[in-house]
C-alpha cells in the first residue's frame, strides 16, 4: 500500500527518503517531504523517528552557532578596556542591543519555516550570521565610535532570531509524547552556544590578552559556513507545514499565549539576560579583571544549557506546570542568596547563587516549552468544534501551538533586555546590583503564583464541577 502523496505546486523530482508500505513518506526535489504523521505509531517507528532525529541534530548545530553569535557582544565588552572610552552603563547598553533585535526578529523567523520550509529557512538563517561577524571584524578596535558599535551589535540580533524558527521546525517534526525532550535538546544545544563563546573568549584572553577580540571571529566565521552547508545537505522541508496567518491571529488573541509569555520571560529571559550581564556584574560589583570574570561567566550558561533537556524530560513525566511552579520558587530562593551575598561582599556565595539561577532558569526553559504545545493540544480536544474529529483537532493545535511558540519566544527574549536595563539602572543609582535582584525576586514569586492559579489550582477545583472543560489545562 502506498500512502497518497500531497499535491504540490513544486515540480516533482527524484524520490528522496521513502519506504514502501505502512509509514511511507515521499520527498520531492529540494528535500521536500510530502507525507508526515508523527502521531501515527507505525509511521513514526518505520520512518519518522530517523528523519526527525537527523533534522534535530543539525538544527541543534545551527542554533548553537546562532546563540554564540547572539552572545558575542557579552564577550566583546570584556575586551573593551580604557582605550575604548566606554563606561559600565554604555557596556550594558551594548549587550542589550542584540537582545532587543533578536527578540523582535523571532516573530518573522517563526513564520519563515512555514513560508520557505524548515531546511531552506535554516540555511538562510545560518548564512545571515555572516553579516554581524564579518562587519564586526572590520570595526572592533579602539577609535570606533560608540554609535558604530551599537549598530554592529544590533546585527548580532540575527543570532537570536534563529531560536524561534528552529523550535517551530522541531515542534512540527516530533509527536506530542516526545516533544518535551526533543525541544529541550534543541533549545539546550542552542543555549550552550552562550557558554561556548564565553569559553572561547576566556581562552583568547588567557592566551593573547584582552586586546585581540577579533580572534573570536576567526573561530566563528568558518563555523557559520560549515553549519549552513550541513543544513543544506542533511535537513528536510515538510510540505504539510504551511504559512497560516489565521493560526497566528488565534495564538495572539489566546490568553494562554500571554500567560506563557510572562512565564517564559521569567525563565528564558532570565537565562539570556544573566548570560549577557554576568561578566559585567562581576567586574563592577566585585572588581574582577576581564580574565577573572571570563573564567567564571561561562559556567552559568553551560550548566543552564545542559539541564534544559532535563526540564523537558521531567515535564514529560510529571507535568510541565508542576516543574515550572516549584522552579520559580527555587529561583526566588537563589535570588535571595545573591542579595545576601552582595550585602556581605562574599564573591563565593554570590557566584554560587548566580549559577544556581542559571541552572534553574535552564530547567524552567525546558518545562515552559513543554507546556506550550500541551496547552494547545488539551484546549483543542476540550473545545473541539461539533463534528470535528480528533485528528483534525490535533492538527489545528499543532498549527496554533507552533505560532504561539514563536510569539512566546520573542516576548520571553525581551526579558533579557529588561534584566540588563535593570542592572544598568541599579548600578547607576546604587552602585550595586541589589535593587535589581529585589525586583527579580518579586517577579519570580508572581510567576509562581500565576502558574499555580492557572495550571494547578484549576485541576483541584475541576473534579467537583465540569471535568471535561475545567481540566483543559490540567497536567500540562
Image (cartoon, helix red, strand yellow):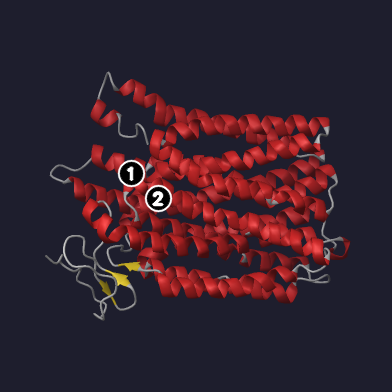
Q: Which mark is residue 376?
A: 1
Q: Is residue 215 left or right of residue 273?
A: right
Residue 368 visible in rendering = no
Q: Secondary structure at mark 1?
A: helix
Residue 217 visible in rendering = yes
Answer above or below: position of 57 versus 285. below
Answer above or below: position of 317 versus 304. above
Residue holding disc 2: 404
Name the residue: 72% across, 77% down. Answer: 138
Q: Secondary structure at mark 2?
A: helix
Q: Position of residue 43 (x, y in %)?
A: 23, 57
Q: Position of residue 456 (x, y in %)?
A: 41, 27
Neighbor class of circle 1 (other Cα within 10 Å; few <14, some 14-19, many 20+) is many
Answer above or below: position of 39 versus 18. above
Q: Position of residue 369 (x, y in %)?
A: 45, 45
Tell me where residue 97 sits by quadrant.
bottom right
Tell me where residue 145 sits by quadrant.
bottom right
Name the residue: 43% across, 47% down. Answer: 181
Amino acid at each position: 500500500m502506498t500512502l497518497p502523496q500531497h499535491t504540490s505546486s513544486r515540480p516533482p523530482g527524484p524520490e528522496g527518503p521513502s519506504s514502501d508500505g505502512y509509514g511511507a513518506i515521499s520527498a520531492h526535489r529540494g528535500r521536500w517531504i510530502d507525507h508526515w504523521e508523527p502521531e501515527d505509531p507505525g509511521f513514526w517507528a518505520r520512518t519518522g523517528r530517523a528523519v526527525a532525529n537527523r533534522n534535530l541534530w543539525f538544527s541543534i548545530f545551527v542554533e548553537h552557532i546562532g546563540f554564540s553569535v547572539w552572545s558575542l557582544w557579552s564577550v566583546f565588552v570584556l575586551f573593551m578596556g580604557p582605550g575604548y572610552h566606554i563606561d559600565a552603563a554604555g557596556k550594558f547598553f551594548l549587550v542589550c542591543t542584540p537582545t532587543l533585535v533578536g527578540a523582535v526578529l523571532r516573530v518573522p523567523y517563526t513564520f519563515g519555516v512555514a513560508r520557505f520550509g524548515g531546511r531552506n529557512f535554516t540555511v538562510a538563517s545560518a548564512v545571515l550570521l555572516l553579516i554581524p561577524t564579518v562587519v564586526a571584524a572590520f570595526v572592533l578596535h579602539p577609535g570606533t565610535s560608540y554609535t558604530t558599535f551599537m549598530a554592529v551589535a544590533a546585527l548580532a540580533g540575527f543570532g537570536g532570531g534563529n531560536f524561534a524558527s528552529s523550535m517551530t521546525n522541531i515542534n512540527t517534526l516530533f509527536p506530542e509524547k516526545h516533544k518535551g525532550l526533543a525541544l529541550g535538546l534543541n533549545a539546550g544545544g542552542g543555549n550552550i552556544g552562550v557558554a561556548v563563546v564565553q569559553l572561547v573568549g576566556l581562552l583568547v584572553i588567557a592566551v593573547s590578552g584582552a586586546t585581540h577580540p577579533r580572534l573570536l571571529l576567526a573561530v566563528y566565521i568558518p563555523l557559520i559556513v560549515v553549519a549552513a552547508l550541513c543544513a543544506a545537505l542533511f535537513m528536510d522541508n515538510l510540505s504539510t507545514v504551511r504559512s497560516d496567518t489565521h493560526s497566528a491571529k488565534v495564538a495572539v488573541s489566546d490568553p494562554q499565549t500571554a500567560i506563557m509569555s510572562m512565564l517564559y520571560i521569567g525563565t528564558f529571559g532570565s537565562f539570556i539576560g544573566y548570560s549577557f550581564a554576568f561578566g559585567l556584574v562581576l567586574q563592577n560589583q566585585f572588581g574582577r579583571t576581564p580574565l577573572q570574570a571570563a573564567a567564571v561567566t561561562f559556567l552559568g550558561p553551560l550548566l543552564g544549557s545542559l539541564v534544559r533537556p532535563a526540564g523537558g524530560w521531567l515535564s514529560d513525566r510529571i507535568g510541565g506546570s508542576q516543574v515550572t511552579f516549584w522552579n520559580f520558587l527555587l529561583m526566588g530562593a537563589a535570588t535571595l542568596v545573591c542579595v545576601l551575598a552582595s550585602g556581605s561582599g562574599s564573591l563565593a556565595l554570590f557566584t554560587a547563587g548566580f549559577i544556581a539561577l542559571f541552572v534553574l532558569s535552564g530547567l524552567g526553559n525546558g518545562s515552559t516549552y513543554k507546556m506550550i504545545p500541551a496547552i494547545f493540544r488539551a484546549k483543542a480536544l476540550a473545545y473541539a468544534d461539533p463534528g470535528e474529529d480528533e485528528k483534525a483537532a490535533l492538527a489545528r493545535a499543532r498549527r496554533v501551538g507552533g505560532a504561539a511558540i514563536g510569539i512566546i519566544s520573542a516576548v520571553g527574549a525581551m526579558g533579557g533586555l529588561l534584566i540588563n536595563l535593570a542592572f544598568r539602572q541599579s548600578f547607576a543609582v546604587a552602585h550595586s546590583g541589589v535593587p535589581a535582584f529585589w525586583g527579580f525576586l518579586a517577579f519570580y514569586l508572581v510567576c509562581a503564583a500565576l502558574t499555580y492559579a492557572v495550571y494547578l489550582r484549576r485541576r483541584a477545583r475541576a473534579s467537583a464541577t465540569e471535568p471535561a472543560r475545567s481540566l483543559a489545562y490540567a497536567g500540562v
